[in-house]
Image (cartoon, grey):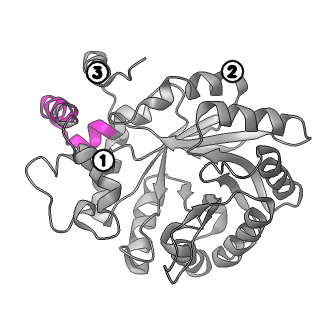
Amino acid sequence: MEQRRLGRTGLRVSAVGLGTMTWGRDTDEIEARDQLDVFLDAGGTLLDTAASYCEGLSEEVIGSLLREHVDRQDLVLVSKAGVRTWRTGERPAAADASRGTLLDTLDASLMRLGTDHLDLWLVQVPDESTPMEETVDALRLAVASGRTRYVGVSNHPAWASVHAADLLREHAGPGMAAVEVEHSLLARGAERELLPAAQVLGFGVIGYAPLGRGVLSGKYRATVPADSRGASPHLRSYVAPYLRPGFEGVVEAVATAAAGLDRRPVEVALAWARETPGIAATIVGARTPGQLQGALAAGDLVLPHQIRRALDDVTAPSA
């Protein structure tokens, strides 16, 4: 698998990363281990998690695998903070990018992961109640203390990402390394402003959900399968936005392109996202090792120009 430079930093990441949003709940440790083996065998290095994923269980599973199954040096380890959650579930999760919460969450993440540093640490969502200067100070301190090698933000609009990058540039250190944002044929908003800003300012862009939260696989064309994320009590609300009227044309276009290439829709969708100019890496999550193998089969697929142009035209973001 191709290894790409993340923005203008010295950090290199695999073109496809492995997402772990369901690890520890819908994906048990045995399945997670098998997925990680499939990913590493394919040449992948970028492993993406967050303190909020399954209320910390995702990081705990990764920590167990790091202790017993895989060498820490084989992975580019990414985690996120800034979403306050409670294991008991009596209160909803809330954005909290205050200095204290971010640094406390980072320390807890490192403990669960069983490592002394992350390769990339991101603020997961915008927090309108905390000044960006305070959030950035926590990022700067995390790098200075060695708890992470690089920092960035996730799910922030272009203007907020640029603001964070400007503030980080005022301090010594690597500056803003990356922004992680949803990007697929169903979600191309990052192409309007974020990708051009990244090119000018030098930070990388990591896309996630390249399969449109599973919808681009075509599995939901007729119904919602009982074993799918769309039927999961934990994830049905995550998938639901793309099951509404208006997205069927994109799903059919991907299916038509796949049929013409004698490939599967997941391969076409992932190849399109992976090769989007300005995207350093795209993160794919899977329910089973078999699903992950199927997605990674797109590693050799380069979409013909005519097909890519057709998909671009069908899904172009509005001005």
In magenta stretch: residue 175: no
Q: Is residue 101 left or right of residue 288?
A: right
At horizontal 62% and vertical 41% (from top left) the residue drawn is 179
Residue at the disc numbered 1? 241
**Placement of the C terminus among the 4 image quadrants:** top left
> For the residue marked with disc 1, what is the amino acid?
Pro
Magenta stretch, residue numbers = 250-269
Q: How many marks?
A: 3
- Near-viewer residue (236 or 17): 236
Residue occupied by mark 2: 200
Residue tagged 3: 304
The residues tagged by marks 1 and 2 sit, at their Cα atoms, a distance apart of 32 Å
* C-alpha span from label 3 to label 1: 30 Å
In this view, 181 is above or below 308:
below
Contact between marks 1 and 2 (CB within 8 A): the answer is no
Is-magenta flag for residue 267?
Answer: yes
